[in-house]
Image (cartoon, helix red, strand yellow):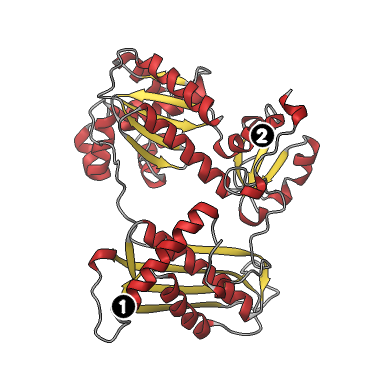
Amino acid sequence: MFALIDCNNFYASCERVFDPTLEDKPVVILSNNDGCVIARSNEAKALGINMAAPAFMMKEVLEKHQVQVFSSNYALYGNMSNRVMCTLHELVPALEVYSIDEAFLDLRNMPYTDLDKLARRIRKTVRQYTGIPVCVGIAPTKTLAKLANRYVKEYTKTGVFLIDNDQVRDQALAATAAGDVWGVGRQYGKLLEEHGISSALDLARTDINWIKKHMSVVGERMVRELRGEPCYDLDEQPQPKKGIITSRSFGTPVTDYAILQEAVATFTARCAEKLRKQKSAAHLMHVFTFTNRHRPDQPQYYGSKVLHLPVATNSTMEMIEVAMRGLKLIFRKGYYYKKAGIMVSGLVPEDQVQTDLFAMNERKRELDRKALVALDKINRRMGRDTVRVALQGYNSSWHLRQERKSRCYTTRWAELLEIGANELR
């Protein structure tokens, strides 16, 4: 049996952990630069606030219903996600982190006969240890576990749903649209609808040869999983990424080269940090920047440059040096830049890098490696960019606009929650 653990309204729940007065109140979280709604509490959903709704168009509704609005606080959400996953690791022997708020658990070797009781214990423990409410769907396959978790949110209030026999499975399948099955995308959804396959139950009962012909072997596995035949195991060690991108829209348009330089240097440092985390090195770097296409009254420009690194690297210093060469080639005066970014590709394991006779000598490369190990260790302990390359600077004018951001309660010493003597009584 597999279980899918899904945190309820995760971003809103993170905000509520540190501010209990938000309980039972409508809460929404905004995207970068406070643009659109990216998360909602159940109370906000009940008001008809839609995902991706532009915040400025919802202003009247937000004020009328006293909706609590927050800028996205990814440092907080990431840390809270890690706490949830660590708690789950303590409860089960095998786990696959599927997303920031979802995880698959392998229950096949668990010494429990009462899976419903185990699921309730998991919910209670995660809530007690982290403050985050979760739903649990349990089934013989990962696809059915995903479907069970969806079912528990829409049709029950218990927070747990167990598919352990054919009757219960068919009940959940009949209540789920075929287009909502995990693995059915928009195009396959249209195909199924055209052929009268409207529910997940219809999909599970469709001839397997037809599925294989029209939806390939991936569709065949999905249907077999809906029938209760396990085709996918846990992926406990996700494969390293084949490419990494770091880009941001600026809080205010950037026209000055020095400010743009600081932003691109920071994005490059982020890419290098991610490369080191997965123990990879990059051969190619793509530097880009562009203006706001939604402002036709301003001149438009898209600058892009792909640069080849002679020796694959994950060194922040080396990569920033190359990125600055690329930025210098694409920068044009007289434009209002809205966004910039760095993408690295051609990734190889860092212990399999082919050196170059004319590249940086090995002695300097080794010194860089030691310096970066120390840099990463300090930044993990004291906070990101506590130690940084000078070119990253301290100019905050290009940073995201986050006027409603909550405190980083778990990742910054200066923003820890303070409890006075009166609160302890």
Q: Which residue is drawn at 28% across and 87% down?
A: 358
183 on left or right of 387:
left
As helix, strand or loop, the secondary structure at mark 1 comes to helix
As helix, strand or loop, the secondary structure at mark 2 comes to helix
Are the residues tagged 2 and 1 within 8 Å (C-beta)?
A: no
Q: Which callout, 2 or 1, points at the residue further toward the start of the chain?
A: 2
Q: Which residue is drawn at 30% across and 41% down?
A: 236
Q: Which one is nearer the viewer's eye here, 193 or 13?
A: 13
Quick one: label 2, few (<14), some, or many (20+) residues within 10 Å? many
Amino acid of disc 2: Ala
Q: Residue at x 71, y 49 (%)?
A: 404
Q: In which quarter of the image is residue 181?
A: top left
Q: Is residue 165 above or below residue 315?
A: above
Q: Distance between the residues labelled 2 and 1?
A: 58 Å
Q: Is residue 199 visible?
A: no
Q: Which one is nearer the viewer's eye here, 1 or 278?
A: 278
Residue 29 % position (x, y): 64, 44
Quick one: label 1, few (<14), some, or many (20+) residues within 10 Å? few
Q: Quadrant where the N terminus lies?
A: top left
Which circle marks residue 336 in the picture?
none
Residue 251 % position (x, y): 67, 63
Q: Mark 2 points at which residue?
A: 44
Q: Name the residue under label 1.
A: 363
**Tag in front: 2 or 1:** 1
Amino acid of disc 1: Arg
Residue 4 % position (x, y): 39, 30
